[in-house]
Amino acid sequence: MRYRKLGRSDLQVSEVSLGSWLTYGGGVSREQAEACVQRAFDVGVNFVDTANVYSGGAAESFLGEVLSGRPRASYVLATKLFFPMPSGDRGLSAAQIEKQLDASLGRLRTDHVDLYQCHRFDPHTPLEETMAALTRAVRGGKARYIGFSEWTAGQVRDALALAGERFVSSQPQYSLLWREPEAEVFPLCAREGIGQIVWSPLAQGILAGKYLPGQPVPEGSRAASPGMGQFIQRRLDPATLAGVQRLRPIAAEIGLTLSQLAIAWVLRRPEVSSAIIGATRPEQVEENARASGVVLEASVVERVERALTGH
Ligand SMILES: NC(=O)c1ccc[n+]([C@@H]2O[C@H](COP(=O)([O-])OP(=O)(O)OC[C@H]3O[C@@H](n4cnc5c(N)ncnc54)[C@H](OP(=O)(O)O)[C@@H]3O)[C@@H](O)[C@H]2O)c1
């Protein structure tokens, strides 16, 4: 496993990191979830991403339990707030930041997170209030650094113009099937010392090539799961799935699986500090981790991008 510096921070994060949306404390059995985390550490993953809202707090509780046996300095822990909790609490007000961070620390069984992220922008709270509260969280020692997820370039610029702690990370969706942040967020963040930790690098498993156009979704996959499948359904259009199948010979030619090719493609960008994968089985963690260190030649990148769109 290789490691990259997260923006201007002093955090070194593994190129492939492990997320917990839908999976841990949720749709994946406790035993399998624990095996995934264990395998992640075995293959050099040191960066774990979660959020207060994942499975209504159960993802954090699970991680708190399984990580508590490890030295705290041996992993980088990130969580988030914004989306409504089962209690109805939501948003980025100062009161919420204080309350949600304390609740997350309790579930995670730690006195600090390495990265505290705004899961989305909150249009109902003055940005000054949010940034001042995040600054207090850092200066009080409860969060080492702060980040955001899916903010526009304009929102990021407004935050950077304020006094106090500065963001070190951006968490956008980014994959061969979703390139939007390349246009504005990547260049702005690169100039400002903000690293990208990108979510759904496999487009929730679509880029692993398991979904075939015109075929029923495979048993045991996210799309077949009543608990985890609701967000992937609308992305399973036949043209996309056919495009992914055209990547198969290219991956085979360079000795990679489709998942490894997709993750290596994301990691080709120096702006990306880490690709946050999800995994339902330890074998997936191991396979995906091997994408770290793979260098794709420019001609391969070009062929991959063309094949996907059919040009
Ligand atoms: N900031 C945000 O708003 C936001 C939003 C979404 C996610 N995230 C973060 O990003 C993380 C990753 O998101 P994601 O789970 O959608 O990521 P992903 O890596 O794109 O998809 C993960 C899913 O793909 C399948 N998969 C993974 N490796 C595979 C392999 N080698 N072969 C075949 N299938 C494989 C597994 O599903 P099956 O085995 O069930 O098919 C796995 O659960 C989340 O856990 C979360 O931390 C953040």
Image: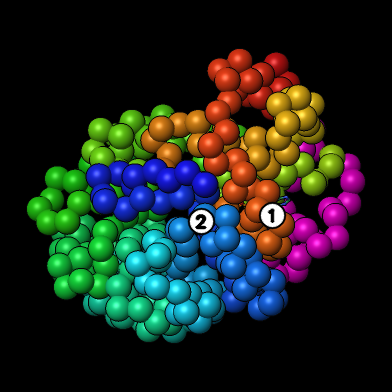
**Left or right: where 6 falls relative to 209:** left
Image-based side of 307 in relation to 71, left or right: right
Q: Specify few, some or many for label 2: CA neighbours under 10 Å numbering under 14, 14-19, or 20 or more.
A: many
Which residue corresponds to mark 2?
45
Q: Is mark 1 within 8 Å of ligand 1?
A: yes
The percent coordinates of residue 35 (x first, y second) are 65, 70
Question: What range is drawn magenta here?
Answer: 214-243
Task: Say how the picture is coloured.
Answer: rainbow
Residue, far left: 163
Image coordinates for residue 93, horizontal then vertical, percent: 25, 70
Magenta region includes residue 262 = no
Mark identifier at residue 284? 1
Residue 64, visible in the rendered structure = no
Point out which mark residue 143 bears: none
Work out whether 309 lies above or below 80.
Answer: above
Q: At 30% across and 44% down in the image, what residue appears? A: 7
The C terminus sits in image quarter: top right
- Residue 153 falls in image quadrant: top left
Residue in the foreground of this view, choosing between 80 and 72: 72
Q: Amino acid at mark 1?
A: Gln
Residue at 23% across, 42% down: 157
Placement of 182 over or under 260, stated as above or below: above
- Is residue 223 magenta-colored? yes
Query: Can residue 43 be seen?
Result: yes
Q: Is mark 2 within 8 Å of ligand 1?
A: no
Of circles 1 and 2, which is in front? 2
Q: Residue at x 71, y 22 (%)?
A: 307
> Splitting the image into four quadrants, where does ligand 1 fall?
bottom right
Q: Secondary structure at mark 2?
A: loop
Residue 215, given in percent of the width and then of the height, sits at 89, 46
